[in-house]
Amino acid sequence: MSQSDRTAVVGAPQGADDGLLLPRPPGVFRRFWARHPRTADGIVAAIAFLLSAPSAAIRSEYPVPPTGGQTALAIALVLIGCAALLLRRSRPVLVFIVAALPLVILPPSLVPAAHLVPAFAIYAMAVYRSVRACWIGFGTASGLMVLYTVAAGLAAPATWGFLITSLVSGVIALLIGALIGINVGNRRRYLEALIDRSRQLLVERDQQARLGAAAERTRIAREMHDIVSHNLTVVVALAEGAAATPDPARSRAVAEQIADTARGALGEMRAMLGVLRDPDLAPDAPLAPVESASLADAVEAAQRAGFPAVLHVEGRLDDVPAEVRFAVARIVQESLTNAMRHAPLATTIDARITVRSDAVGLDIVNDGVRSGADLGDPGGRAGFGLPGLRERAAHVGGTLEAGPVDGRKWAVRATLAVPAPQPAATADTEDHGR
């Protein structure tokens, strides 16, 4: 849709489509009405005056003819009522009161001249105020016209026929204006509600897109942190060991381990980038292949770096869903990395995994804590490791806690939920299916 094919809907603020690409109103006159509301109000007021003024100047069939002053008053009141129509969008109730006053203050012979302007005014009240206000205005004006007709008829019984005809024509004019205004006003309010709802959906879509982008950045950052932080920590530890040993053979072996660790990290990065570039990737799919995280590799890397890491597994971890196994491996890997970074003097790094039918328990404890700065807690050098672990545990329906225990130990404890296996179809069901 081109820019020239868009505009605001009738009654909507100009330029307020907020990127909704609203179609322009059909028809030349409707588009003119939408783009030039003040000019349109002036045209309506002029038409109302041109149609009403002749009725005040033409002699009616009423037995008592109006005087010249009464005729001038009628024209002046009609002119005031028509001028008030310029405010029909912002002050519809006030405009209707001003337009309806001539119906009960002019002489009976001049009342027909004031029938048309209130019809325009009650239309505006239905469109720009409410249907309820329109019916209240119609009932009030009709009631006052009836009282006025009864009083004039009692004062001059010979004029009952003219008065009733004038009353009926006035009520019909008001009713036509009210019904047209209610129809147009309801349509206008319905369109405004649709546009407002569309605008809300547009805002919500943008908000969801921003939240989704933020969540995706967080997921990517978590995977990058787990890959880069762990492997670089191992590389740094190995490099320091190689620099400290005088034995060329051991130094060469450590350099080979550094190369192996770096190649492994590079392979994990390539695997993650391959997953990210997959066009068929599900929104909640793991960003790294679940097979890329290995408990044995994580513990072996820590041991090669000279840290006393030990792994104990109770139960069959292979029976656990792949997504939970991946979370277990990443949590153990990040816990070992934190221990290597913040507890270099640890004499024990014990990682225990307990597999149950409904959950997997993890307990990783090291005894190398020296101070709050070594804990990586909010009181020390807070990083992204522990928040990332909590997010990873929550992603598979688990919980994770980390903190000091027994003064000189640091423990990471997690419980990851294991989904219940789906019941297999029975033999009877299979036979019935055949």
Image (cartoon, rainbow, N blue to C red):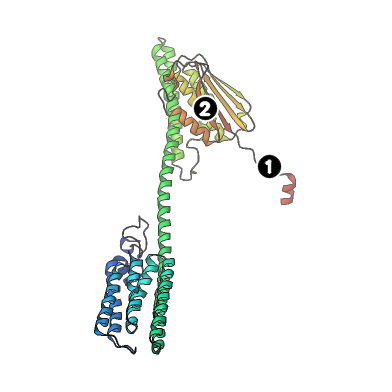
- Out of 150 and 91, give the one closest to the viewer: 150
- Out of 299 and 47, give the one closest to the viewer: 47
| Coordinates of residue 74 in the picture (x, y in percent) | 28, 79
Quadrant (top left, top right, bottom left, bottom right) of the N terminus? bottom left
Q: Which residue does the numbered mark 1 point to in the structure image?
A: 424
Q: Secondary structure at mark 2?
A: strand
- Out of 286 and 257, give the one closest to the viewer: 286
Question: Which residue is drawn at the image coordinates 41% and 66% (left, top)?
Answer: 133
Q: Is residue 43 visible?
A: no
- Out of 326 and 71, give the one closest to the viewer: 71
| Coordinates of residue 99 in the picture (x, y in percent) | 33, 73
- Above-or-below relation of 149 to 394: below
Three-letter code for the amino acid on which mark 1 is drawn? Ala
| Coordinates of residue 304 in the picture (x, y in percent) | 48, 18
**Disc with the residue nearer the chain's start (2 vs 1):** 2
Question: Disc 2 vs disc 1: Cβ atoms closer than 8 Å?
Answer: no
Q: Nearer the viewer, mark 2 or mark 1?
A: 2
Q: Secondary structure at mark 1?
A: loop
Q: Which residue does the numbered mark 2 point to in the structure image?
A: 401
Q: Which mark is residue 67?
A: none
Instruction: Give the crowd class for mark 1: few <14, some 14-19, many >=20 residues within 10 Å.
Output: few
Three-letter code for the amino acid on which mark 2 is drawn? Glu
Rounded to the nearest angstrom, the CA distance separating label 2 from label 1 is 36 Å
Question: Which residue is drawn at the image coordinates 38% and 88% (left, top)?
Answer: 159
Q: Quadrant of residue 132?
A: bottom left
